[in-house]
Amino acid sequence: MGRGEFAQVKEHLKAASEKPSIGWKPVGDHEVYVLLADIGAINKDKELLSAYALRSDEISLSLKHHLYHAITLRALAILDWLDHDFTRAEERLKESWQLFQRLETHWQIGRTLYDLGELSDGIGKHDEAKSYFTQAQAAFRIMGVQDFPK
């Protein structure tokens, strides 16, 4: 097998990537950057966020892609949070939340409110945190979600 088809995978993939697309468009770099930034935010992975969040946001702004911009703002906020810049993190999370509200993306609203709740709780704003968690639950319930992160 080592000398057969499997040994030629690299060449086949390279040749396929050089052919013109046939009615479909492959995922662009900007989409990959946004996904990696979002994964970094979910996992609070500073290395991943540092590598992709800022570039993702630059591309999102240049494309005027509001959803991607809101996602990467949240990612940048998490990076600020990890860097202990809690004021900037809160500002970015709130801006992201506002964009998601305009887009009526309830899942993203809930995730962002949950992050605001965690941030607020972590810096001792417990009443604010409770309010954010309650609002996050309401956003998730709109989508039929019954179990919430603990």
Image: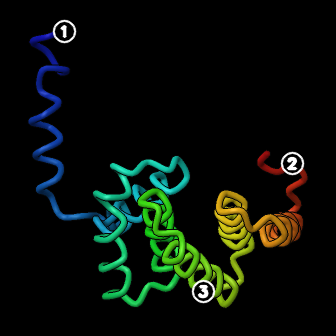
Residue furthest front as drawn: 124
Is residue 67 positioned above or below 2 on the image?
below
Residue 107 in view here = no
Q: Position of residue 45 (x, y in %)?
A: 43, 48
Q: CA distance from mark 3 to mark 1?
A: 53 Å
In the figure, residue 62 lies in which quadrant? bottom left
Mark carried by residue 1? 1
Quadrant into which the N terminus falls: top left
Please rate how many residues cluster around mark 1, counting C-alpha atoms within 10 Å: few if below 14, some from 14 to 19, many from 20.
few
Specify which label sits upstream in the sequence, 3 or 2: 3
Tell me which amino acid carries mark 3.
Answer: Leu
Q: Which residue was labeled with disc 2?
A: 147
Q: CA distance from mark 1 to mark 2?
A: 48 Å
Specify which label sits upstream in the sequence, 3 or 1: 1
Who is closer to the viewer here, 61 or 73?
A: 73
Tell me which amino acid carries mark 2.
Answer: Asp
Q: Which residue was labeled with disc 3?
A: 99
